[in-house]
Amino acid sequence: MRRANQLTPDRAVLLLIDLQEKLLPLIRHHDTIVSATHRLLDGSRPFELPVIATEQYPKGIGPTVESVRQRLQATDVNVIEKLTFSAWACREVRDRMLAIDRPQVILVGIEAHVCVQQTALDLASRDYDVFVCADAIGSRGRIDEEQSLARMRQDGVWVTTVESVLFELCDACDTPQFKAMIEVIKATPPSDE
């Protein structure tokens, strides 16, 4: 029997926040964030989760980093441009989320204390179950990242990791989805950062 707060493939959506070329190199452990995002995108593909991706003011911050953009394009995900820090405050993101109509949001991206946090808090206040992957978010400063995780926890956001999310989506090891997902896990070991 599944718990009320347990991720399920038929109730979850993946939301990628602003993994952009000009800002990403300034983020602490940015290589780990990109690698974890790859694992999440590749590992969740067998579950056919809807994916939404955003870019904050791409004219100034640039497009989504190439390796993530390629994965999104391979699954026909169009990136949504936004000017608001919270993705929920962007009409196009909000409309897409409402159309998808799934109560669980798996959230990754940058910066943890700005766009990720504001999005998570907005979603949680609207009764979404929000799961932030701590290994796939980041900020320029350590204190900003740590305090954003603490703040999100205080407001009912579930803090987890990419690998934990993937195994939770699986639920059991005797499925074709597990077999596909475990190959991604084996090919990309987690970071200890």
Image (cartoon, helix red, strand yellow):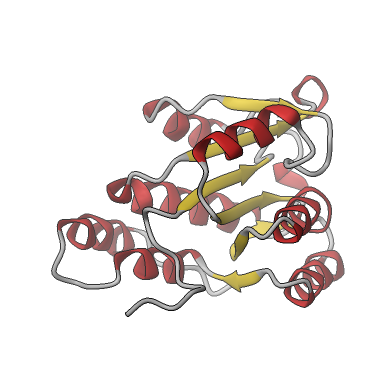
Where residue 124 appears, as percent x and y from the top left, is: 71, 61
> Residue, x 59% and y 27% (percent of image)?
79
* Residue 51 relative to residue 20: left or right: left
* Residue 168 relative to residue 95: left or right: left
> Residue, x 81% and y 68% (percent of image)?
142
Q: How many marks?
A: 0
Does 177 sit above or below residue 148?
above
The answer to which image quadrant residue 48 occupies is top left
Closer to us: 87 or 17: 87
Where residue 126 appears, as percent x and y from the top left, is: 72, 55
* Residue 159 relative to residue 25: left or right: left
Closer to us: 189 or 78: 78
The answer to which image quadrant residue 192 occupies is bottom right
Can residue 21 be seen?
A: no
Q: Quadrant of the C terminus?
A: bottom right
Can residue 51 be seen?
A: yes
The answer to which image quadrant residue 136 occupies is bottom right
Does 155 sit above or below residue 76?
below
> Residue, x 78% and y 77% (percent of image)?
154
> Residue, x 79% and y 19% (percent of image)?
59
Q: Quadrant of the N terminus?
A: bottom left
Where residue 167 appears, as percent x and y from the top left, is: 35, 69
Does 101 sit above or below residue 84?
below
Q: Which residue in the rendered view is the most extreme toward the top? A: 59
